[in-house]
Amino acid sequence: MSQSASKQLLEDLRAVPLFSACTDKELSQIKRLADEVIIPAETVIVRQGAFGQEAYVLLSGSVSVTVSGSEVATLTDGAYFGELAPLDHLPRSATVTATTEVRTLVFNSREFSTLLTEHAAVNRKLLADYAHRLRELSLARAS
């Protein structure tokens, strides 16, 4: 990776809410844990029911998230998905399809575990996001 591409990737990481509390040193370490991948539009990235061990962070582009064939969300720059599979080793709970060309960071199971173990700020942010999602789900069911 060229020096300018490396600098750009650090800037892109800095803009990801999951990494917002990280220092420059931590961002450099995170960059080394993941593979940067370009995924063409209309590509199924993860499929509901399939086993997988990768977690994804969107640097640019958008994806559609479907559950049982119904769209439940559209994710764009800075979002993440697929993080449950490396945590619980169960089948994917949704299908995620690129709706545009997507530039993403891919963490395999080992690197994702390292990310959460060695970067407490990322771990806290992930847990806070889970808590927020659980509260929203509880409120939606109560309505």
Image (cartoon, helix red, strand yellow):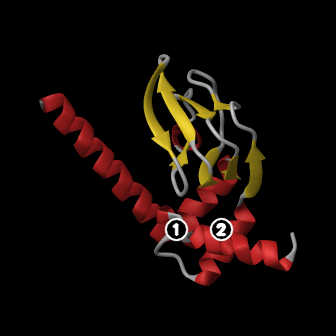
Residue lying furthest left in this view? 143
Residue highlighted by disc 2: 30
Residue lying furthest bottom in this view? 24
Give the quarter of the image for residue 6: bottom right
Nearer to me, 88 or 122: 122
On residue 19, which mark appears?
1
Q: Amino acid at mark 2?
A: Ile
Q: Amino acid at mark 1?
A: Phe
Left or right of 90 on screen, residue 98: right
Q: Is residue 67 above or below residue 75?
A: above
Residue, x 66% and y 43% (percent of image)?
Answer: 54
Q: Position of residue 94 (x, y in %)?
A: 51, 28
Give the quarter of the image for residue 63: top right
Residue, x 55% and y 63% (percent of image)?
Answer: 117
Nearer to me, 44 or 50: 44
Circle 2 SS class: helix
